[in-house]
Image (cartoon, rainbow, N blue to C red):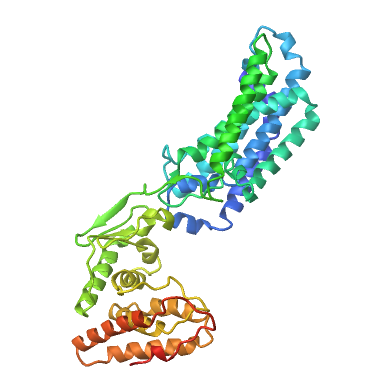
Amino acid sequence: MKFRALLRSSAALWTAPVWVGIVAFYFFYALHLQDPYEEVITGPLWAAQQVAFALEYFYAFAYAITLGLATWEGGRLKRDGVWELAPSRARWRVAGQALAPAVGAGWAILLLPVGMRLVETRLLPTPTAVLPLLMGVGIVCAYAVVGCVLGHLAPRVIAAPFGAVAAFYVISKTSAYSDPLWPRHVSGQLSTSIAFGEYYSAPTVLLPFLVAATVAAAVAAWWSRGSRRIPLRFLGTTAALTTLVLSAQTASGWGVVDGPVSAGHATARCVGAAPKVCMAEAGGAVERLDDVRSEVVGSLEKLRAAGVDVTVPSTVTDGLLYERTRTRPRSTASTWWLPLTAQAETAGPGGRIAGIRYAVLLSSVTFPCSFPATITSDAPTAWIINRDAAMLWAAYTVDAQDPYLRWRSGEYAQFANGPEVLAKVKERAEKGRALPTAAQRTAWFEQEKAKACRDMPKRPSGGPAAIGPQGEDS
């Protein structure tokens, strides 16, 4: 049968308004519900991330509609007695020709949103960016095989819609599974998120494809005919069960939305030396790279001029290059990872970037002891006034007091005497700033740091959190 005649008689053509409408609705409404068009195109833009976003709503639709259409076509092959009319032709060739429109519909449901998203963001696809798309089109073929066999086993009028609805429900609901965890990662609907500079590692996209492919192969083996059908059925079933068990064991060790990814692949643009400052090329704020470096260098110079012992790093790198903290290298004395793009985007055109100065402050000022990462309401907090007064003094030095006070005020809010804490911190910082000479101000700063470490309790104790007399001058 010629392809044009095959297409005209296929259910994929007369159901096209349904699945094309689904693609249009979810792309233009659901896909932009959280991120309006203006926010999407401003960045940061990363092709692999945008492909993952575009496919998020469409995996289950593609598989379900392919299964339904393939079931319908398989039932029609049985009804028309195709195998008796052409007994010498290979079954896979006849079925492949009949299923081509169904497979094409499934591919279109995946390809259309990806293509529109890349056009929308003006991004070029890369081989690593389209890995989830390739996984999806492979799984579509597997569902077509299963659907064709299902159409031979059950009445197509019942099996086609029932199979499509069941497949959509099962696949879409796997994203809610937490116990067991592995269905989220092997169902073909990727629940692993992609951050800027990342792409899916091979196991993340291979496991769902292998599971679908081996199950389809086992189903096809049971449908096969000929003298070798018994060994083929045994081999296919064994391969499918083995693949499913091994995949489930592997995926059970992954996080809820954190399958294996490879990070740090975005390109950076750098300027200057000692420190060299680098920002993400596609982050959306790289045009402010010179301004960002000026803020970094200026803040370091002001701190050193004020007597703060600062080790100037050789490189200051944009944290966006490793957007997720768990994949980002830790900052060292020679290399700092700071949120350069994130902070540069918050400042207006031509405006100073207070967030950059604030980030430099937090990386520059060190204490001779370690403090808790957060303050809990049941922890003693006598040391907080001394520590925060010293930090606020340094923040005034680089004109970063506003973001620092906003951060600390949020943590003080959990204490009953939070406003008094904030007032005391400001009072002590002003006292340090009011000292007559630079040497006195520096000495005061070092004393505050030493007091904070001296007064910090060695172990937490119970009771309500409040600032006691240890925060006073001694």
Q: Nearer the viewer, residue 340 or 44?
A: 340
Q: Is residue 337 above or below residue 90?
A: below
Residue 95 falls in which quadrant of the image? top right
| Residue 364 seen in render | yes
Q: Nearer the viewer, residue 5 or 166?
A: 166
Across and down, in percent, residue 122 comes to 43, 47
Residue shown at 42% from the left, 37% from the top: 127
Quadrant of the snapshot with the C terminus: bottom left
Q: Is residue 216 above or below residue 47?
A: above
Q: Nearer the viewer, residue 89 or 453?
A: 453
Count of numbered circles in the view: 0
Residue shown at 20% from the left, 86% from the top: 438
| Residue 103 seen in render | no
Across and down, in percent, residue 292 comes to 29, 65
Q: Is residue 107 above or below residue 382?
A: above
Across and down, in percent, residue 12 comes to 67, 31
- Left or right placement of residue 327 versus residue 416 in this view: left
- Left or right placement of residue 410 versus residue 358 in this view: right
- Left or right placement of residue 438 versus residue 209 in this view: left
Across and down, in percent, residue 38 comes to 49, 58
Quadrant of the snapshot with the N terminus: top right
Q: Residue furthest top?
A: 88
Residue shown at 28% from the left, 88% from the top: 433
Q: Nearer the viewer, residue 313 or 80?
A: 313
